[in-house]
Image: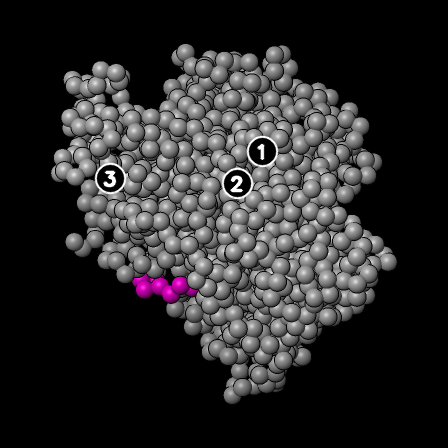
Amino acid sequence: MTRITVTVDGAKYSDDVEPRTLLVHYLRETLGKVGTVVGCDTSNCGACTVHLDGRSVKSCNVLAVQVDGHEVTTIEGLATEAGLHPMQESFHEHHALQCGYCTPGMIMQAIDVLNTHPDPTEEQIRLGLEGNLCRCTGYHNIVKAVAAAAKAPGAAAVSSSKVGD
Amino acid sequence: MTAVDERPAESAEIGKARRRKEDQRLITGRTKWTDNIVLPGMLHLAMVRSPFAHAKVTSIDTEAAKGATNVVAVYTAADFPDGMGACANAWPITPEQVTPDHLPMVTEHVACAGEIVAVVVARSAAAARDAAELVDVDYEELPAVLDAKEALKDEVLAHPDKGTNKSAFWRLDSAEAGTGGSVDEAIAKAREDGIVIEREYRQQRLVPAFMEPRSTVVDPTGEQVTMWTSTQVPHILRFLIAATTGMPESKIRVIAPDVGGGFGGKLQTTPEEFITLAVARKLGKPAKYTETRSESLLSAHHGRDQYQMLTLAATKDGTVTGLKVDLLANLGAYVAIVGGGVPVLGAWMFHAIYKFPAYQFNCQTVLTNTTWVDAYRGAGRPEATFAIERLMDELAAEVGVDPLEIREKNWIKHEEFPFVSVSGMTYDSGNYEAATARAKELFGYDELRAEQKQRRQSGDPVQLGIGVSTFTEMCGLAPSRVLGQLSYGAGGWESAAIRMLPTGKVEVITGTSPHGQGHETAWSQIVADRLGVPFDDVEVLHGDTAIAYKGLDTYGSRSLVVGGEAVVRAADKVIEKAKPFAAHLLEASVDDLEFKDGRYAVKGTDKGVGITEVALATFASHNYPDHLEPGIDADATYDPVDFSFPHGTHLCAMEVDTETGASTIRKYVCVDDIGQVINPLIVEGQVHGGLVQGIAQALWEEAVYDDNGTLVTGSFVDYTLPTTADTINFVTDNTTSLATTNTLGTKGVGEAGTIASTPAVVNAIVDAVRDRGIHDIQMPCTPARVWAALQSAGSAEVAQAQPHFHEEAANNADPGTTGEGSGS
Amino acid sequence: MIPSSFEYVAPTSVEDALAALAEAGDEGKVLAGGQSLLPVLRMRLNAPEKVIDLGRVEGLRGIREDGDTIVIGAMTTHDEVANSELVKEHAALLAKATAEVADPQIRHRGTLGGAIVHADPAGDLGAPVLALDAEMVIAGPGGERTVAAKDFFTDLFETAVGDGELLTAIRIPKHTGWGAHYEKFVRVAHQWSIVGVAATVKADGGTISEAKIGLTNMGSTPLRAASVEAALAGKSASDVADACSSAADGTNPPSDLNGDADYRRHLATVLTSRAVAAAAAG
């Protein structure tokens, strides 16, 4: 077991973990952050995408021990009492989800796309989401939602508390 | 085109693009996926699976695994002398069908790779996985048969004890059925003085590949056993658990919590579900099994895998006179729940929207040492639609006219509805002219044809092709009496109940089991309109057999047209039931009341009472008619009178890079006629997703086994699902011909996009290179395959590539050389 | 799936990392960005007893100039390489190829050194590194040594990095002002390259004076298309197809679900022609 201290969605946690524990399993099983899900075992699907120190990563492709001392934001850390994150709002508004299984990872990656390209072209959105598989939507409305969110204030912020009111 | 039906009288909710009620929990990560469930003392399962496609298990040594730390038990089939239930086949297509027993765990005979031979139960999933590697299984490998054509030879047997690989043969013949003429006569005549098109098409094996891996949690504590499972079919599962384990049905509660996609892939009752149940009951502790993606690709059922031998007869001018279909379907190692029936569903669809006077459909199903095959989005209809829409393009090329012209010549005119098809189905409504006209307009058909011509003339290395698919399909499974005639093991009705709560809220209980379709939203819209209550006051409950106690679940684009109609009827019963209470409260006669916008009003007065006030009054029960019991809740079970027949016109432009063989989608337009739209946002989403799954069959996906029966495409590295970067924005629209078989005039939409899009894409690719003598490319049309076709174009090899079932056939000329009218 | 159990060490210096590696011997596995290693461990295709994480080693991350050379620390992420102004200016081919690696999430974690040492023949970074005549800096028990890229890739998943050694940096001679293009051919976006061509070209007034071309997935290691390079010298940038027709000479590409060896050989010539034309154009 290895002791790690991690900040997740703004709260600090300290746990003993087996070195082989994947970040996604630490989030789900130790912290109960089951909003982040597992969709594959080869890092293709992106369903488990979270932010590590502000950049998107696939949490199935990171060991929990590697994030000792770092900061993680999951889908559960986006909305605040003030309301949903603009990207969450946009996914809802544009029907960018059906079964919703890919949605947490898709939203986290979509925010990263806007971090990189605040005013993205359709191509930048499509390339930016190429590591996230969705089987329901045909991607059409996801791309639309991200484009629309880019016009919303604060859509690239990882916490909606940073959104200007 | 003005023949499109008008929409019904205006309503507040139906037709409105309501944002979904389901979204809030899904976008915030507050979802209840089965794998999220944790119960006190819950144990975790890991399966030990056969790496061999065909083998005999000679010994299993579980001692090392049993001794591992944190392992509670290791079981093989021998530990369950009374069995653990069975994976049932609910639809034997003939009385003689060869149906090998499909037990959850192998006793001795392994019939495909991935079959479960032992299960490890441990305190954590990791400990279970670790110990699974310690289970030592000895196998005696047997020769495996993998391909359907090989299986047909009966040289290597998938189940040696059965003596044959042939499972069943099923025929529909229009002359025998009295629904049309003799197809053999039609073909013979066409050989003399008409056109005969003979083709063999391959429907490759696919994987449904829902995003949420399957997961099952069983809690055996308490009086009832509760199973949460990632399924499309909680009701059917509960019934089959009872039927195959002997457990009283009343002691089983099945819950489908949030389910992450299905596409047919979760309508199976699975070995993993039966094993988790058996282990939990044996140990008396909650147990969980969650599959890995690799396990999912290998062991959740596969789809398609057919060979289609097709003969189309026509007159010289392109009027179709007959269609003969010989289907060879690979069922995999077992006849899955509706595995034998899926190819047979094509029987009523191969002739599609065209007026064939003679028709014959033959289907041979075979067993092989591969993963069992069952419904995948469209189930039987995509295969049929692909075949006929590809053939109509070939006919157009043969006649030398535009592919839309040949279709229009042969399709059912809108004034001919209702139309009885050559297979005996009654199409209630449709307007192919209107959908096609709208699609052409949105597509810019003539401009793209002009560009195609220009690129061809200039010898552009990137050629343009246009693909057409004017599809129909039959969905809304299904009238129970029809299912009875087909020996299907259940009915096709659906159930709904409505509870009028005293606070004015309305609970709708549906027997459908959504997993992404948005029933909570759509059903709320229907009920809000029907009962005149606010959309937000309607709550839709589903997917729990203790709450929605009666239902037949979600598949086959049935939920709205069957389940939605049940909701309508339950609502109408509530209105009727509440009426005497309203009359009593208003001190008026029932006959003087009219119900509108949620109120019972006394005709000709301003007196009235709201239906939610009636609900409160009946809850209080202080003052109600003596002859009634105090309650206005109602339920309804609706058995559909017929199938649903949506249709549409899909147009696809593909760019084919002749230097690399790469194909890219340039433009895709579809105009679907699905009758009354309840929620256009949801409909559009269903179409988009359906399109990409159908396009993926055309371009990207194929489950491939090596010669030993090992699944080569066993992860998402090799089973190549498309991404955002591979797809485009689609242009979608609707025309509306109301269905006449249900109250709201709705038709199914869940599978339409998938059914229609595959041939549109392949037709476009072939159209791009047809002038080089190419008339088919096998799916998926990978760059390597397209390039290979281009390399061999014009050579003798190409002519050989087209099957000629009768060597003396009149039309052995290369059709590609005669397609002058096809945009060249 | 969950990897088999292993011990984990996170050294903070190259010396400590080498010591940990020496101690682990055959049972040790170095973890760089982990984007290829973790799937392998999860699928249990490999089960090392000890994982040595380089993520906390000082000085292995970053990009700097050293005279005529750009030095990239082995633990520098793909995202950093692709977006580095230094790399874009002086080794544009590497920046462009790196931007094509996998997907954004993986580029945020994956490292240049990790990818190079993993030496997957379908990986996108061997070809540009080889084309740019990079040098690999390898630290070992006996100190540091430098290996030219042409000698570095020895076989399928094999490099010159020996037991007990670590790749610490990649030194790339400046190719300032050279045009560059990486042409990646895939069926779906998240796939490994079926074939990739890394081309960088020095052109003066529409004439190519020098060209360097690396091929991805045309053999068990990244390859240089030497005959094409020779044929391109002095050619007009607008007419490169003939010169590129020998791109597949001496290659030994695999056959798999995505295409057979002949198809890959054909692709290599077409893609080389396209890559060179694009490189010459900028």
Give the left or right position of residue C263, taking residue B86 as reference: right
Between the residue at mark 2 and the residue at mark 3, the CA separation in whole angstroms equals: 31 Å
Residue B742 % position (x, y)? 44, 40
Is tag 1's residue or tag 3's residue first in the polypeptide sequence?
1
Residue at mark 1 to residue at mark 3: CA–CA distance = 37 Å
What is the chain identity of the residue bearing mark 2?
B
Q: Which residues are magenta?
A: A117-123
Q: Residue at x 61, y 47 (%)?
A: B421
Q: Return the mark for residue B643.
A: 2
Q: Which one is nearer the viewer's eye here, B8 or B133? A: B8
Asked whether the residues under the numbered discs 2 and 1 touch, taking CB atoms below 8 Å apart as contact, a structural biologist would say yes
Please say if A79 is above or below A130: above
Disc ID at residue B596: 3
Tag 1: amino acid:
Val
Chain letter for mark 3: B
Cβ atoms under marks 1 and 3 closer than 8 Å: no
Residue positioned 53% across, 82% down in the render: C203
Q: Which residue is mark 1?
A: B482
Q: Main secondary structure of the magenta part?
A: loop
Q: Which residue occupies the foreground of this view, B608 or C240? A: B608
* Residue in view at x 44 percent, y 31 percent: B638
Query: Which amino acid, by three-letter code, is at mark 3?
Result: Lys
The image's mark for residue B442 is: none
Assess whether residue A121 is covered by the magenta stretch: yes
The crowding category of the residue bearing disc 3, from other C-alpha atoms within 10 Å (few below 14, some 14 to 19, many at least 20), is some
Q: Give the crowd class for mark 2: few <14, some 14-19, many >=20 residues within 10 Å.
A: many
Residue in front for this viewpoint, B303 or B50: B303
Q: CA distance from mark 2 to mark 1?
A: 10 Å
